[in-house]
Amino acid sequence: MTIDTKAPTATEGRLPVRVATGGWWRSAWTLPEVRWATVATVLFLAGLFAELAGGPGWVTWSLFIACYVAGGWEPGWAGLQELRNRRLDVDLLMVVAAIGAAAIGQVLDGGLLIVIFATSGALEAVATKRTEDSVRGLLDLAPDTATRIRRAVETGDGEETVRVADLVVGDEVLVRPGERIGADGTVIDGASEVDQATITGEPLPVDKLTGDEVFAGTLNGTGAMRIRVDRPATESVVARIAGLVEEAARTKAKTQLFIEKIEQRYSVGMVAATVALFVIPLLLGQPLTPTLLRAMTFMIVASPCAVVLATMPPLLAAIANAGRHGVLVKSAVVMEKLGGTTQVALDKTGTLTRGTPYLAEVRLLPGVHLTEDEILTLAASAEHPSEHPLAAAILRAARARGLALQPVEEFTAAPGRGVSAVVGGRVVRIGAPAAFADAETQARADVDELAEGGATAVVMAVDGEPVAVLGIVDQIRPEAVDAVRRMAQLTSQRPVLITGDNSATAAQVAATVGITDVRAGLLPDGKVAAVRELQAGGQRVTVVGDGINDAPALAAAHVGIAMGGARSDLTLQTADGIVVRDDLSAIPAVIALSRRARRVVTANLIIAGTFITGLVIWDLVGHLPLPLGVAGHEGSTVIVGLNGLRLLRNKAWNQAASAHNSR
């Protein structure tokens, strides 16, 4: 039977992640880019007011010069540093153009240029800062110390606390209930259930018995275990995850906006042309003043201000719009790259699913005379003292039905085996199928069928007689099916599922959401290999995940996105973007928004290129008055800026969220 119960909410059982809405301005004010941009803007507005009000010229000029210094010193200094590396930074070029405008009396135009660039830099800095401040969920991977069992000739066995880094292969360590395991190793005594979602992504704890492998950084459950260390700390799975992230970040080429690559060459050519326009006429005997005026006019109208602003405002507006709707994109480069996605790779637990188990089925065994509600009441009562996640799923199901729990006596829990209790005079046992040898024949068919469907099966016995098999699953996100469909439409390829969970569970989830390419049972290095394989086939892969085990794949991907439920700072720092509201449907929406931003950038470049070409030809062939050249240059800048800012509207996000096959 299918049990009708309230599914867990998006944040139930997970660490909540919230957008930092209060005090964000105070946080932004800590950024020097914001402070200098604010000062530059205030000074510019004061200078503009003084000029319009007919104030003394020295006051107006003083305010504008102060604006130049406040908004231009930092990009100017950074540009000079770049010159030492033989790179001409476009920001330095803009500062020089602003100074040139002031030198020929156009101090207002130069001030506007400074303010625009300072504000652009500040907005990008704020976007990055808010990404860092808006996400919480720090989780220490491995403990600093471990309890090593030492052998003493005179005193017998004893314990000592040592640094995990000092453990060597062959050492034996004791892991108590609730502790994190300090080293990769093998269980040599004891039993427990271990939450190893940080490594494999499995949503439920895994029973560990003698001979089983355990990983550093995973969380022990209710039992105590003695573990033999198999790998030193530097070679543990946790250490390899960090190494994979570092390697992926190192091999991932340093990317720039596409237009920035063009700007480097364009800027050098423009400076060379300006110098030629000034030097050659002088050598030919032309007067200094008109020659300088023409060269400065050329420099202003040919400067790539409009080209730069054709790119940044649309991308920054898209970042801001996505942020308002719960997606934090860390840079304009990332926003640009998102639109180039041709393949999406999805983790399972916490991405396609909630990561919280719930009771999906109660199957009564033949000959049982108890009702389903009676079975669930007994099961929930017996599990009530337990802290196991499976117990929590059973309790939630009972509460959803409004069932009253009964008093419990003689409760016992056997790590890795299950629980037993006396409920209303009846002895109730609930545990793994392996713990019920007498239920082998009666329950095997149901256990196998539930396992094939991706569920975790537990057997329940009352007074020694098996009565039911409970199927517990990880709930698929309600938006997952539509989100996967839209990703497939946007990229013309179905997403790929990459997960550390077992093949049966992965296949069941994939079939439900419409994914056909399933890569299951992958440790972190296996996920990286899967991403590399897709990239080798020419795909630009966006990886979506939420666990520490996903961090290396996020780093290796074209773009890595972390779901808002991510509980690791490593995952959040590695990701290029974060879905703060933990809504999978935001992934296709932000990809579609990026593609729209790229189209706006293309349109802006056409507009800017047309203006620059026309003004340059006018200046070279005829005589372009400087005021008209400045007006045309600034006019094109304003046009492309306003065109890009259209992406700030909610309408832009709504259109992206409902877009289908907009490539």
Image (cartoon, rainbow, N blue to C red):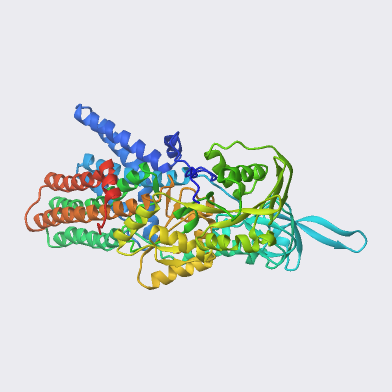
Measured as percent of width and height from the top left, residue 237 is found at 60, 64
Given residues 430 and 190, the one toward you in this image is 430
Measured as percent of width and height from the top left, residue 454 is found at 51, 60
Residue 70 appears in the rendering: yes
Left or right of residue 518, residue 660 in this image:
left
Residue closest to the far right: 154
Left or right of residue 554, residue 610 in this image:
left
Q: Quadrant of residue 89?
A: bottom left
Q: Is residue 445 above or below residue 656?
A: below
Q: Quadrant of the C terminus?
A: bottom left
Given residues 412 and 660, the one toward you in this image is 412
Residue 501 appears in the rendering: no
Residue at 91%, 58% (x, y): give it.
155
Measured as percent of width and height from the top left, residue 141 is found at 61, 54
Measured as percent of width and height from the top left, residue 316 is found at 32, 47
Residue at 60%, 36% (x, y): give it.
404
Residue at 69%, 61% (x, y): give it.
438
Q: Is residue 117 above or below residue 45?
A: below
Total numbered labels: 0
Left or right of residue 36, residue 661 in this image:
left
Given residues 445 and 326, the one toward you in this image is 445
Given residues 483 and 616, the one toward you in this image is 483
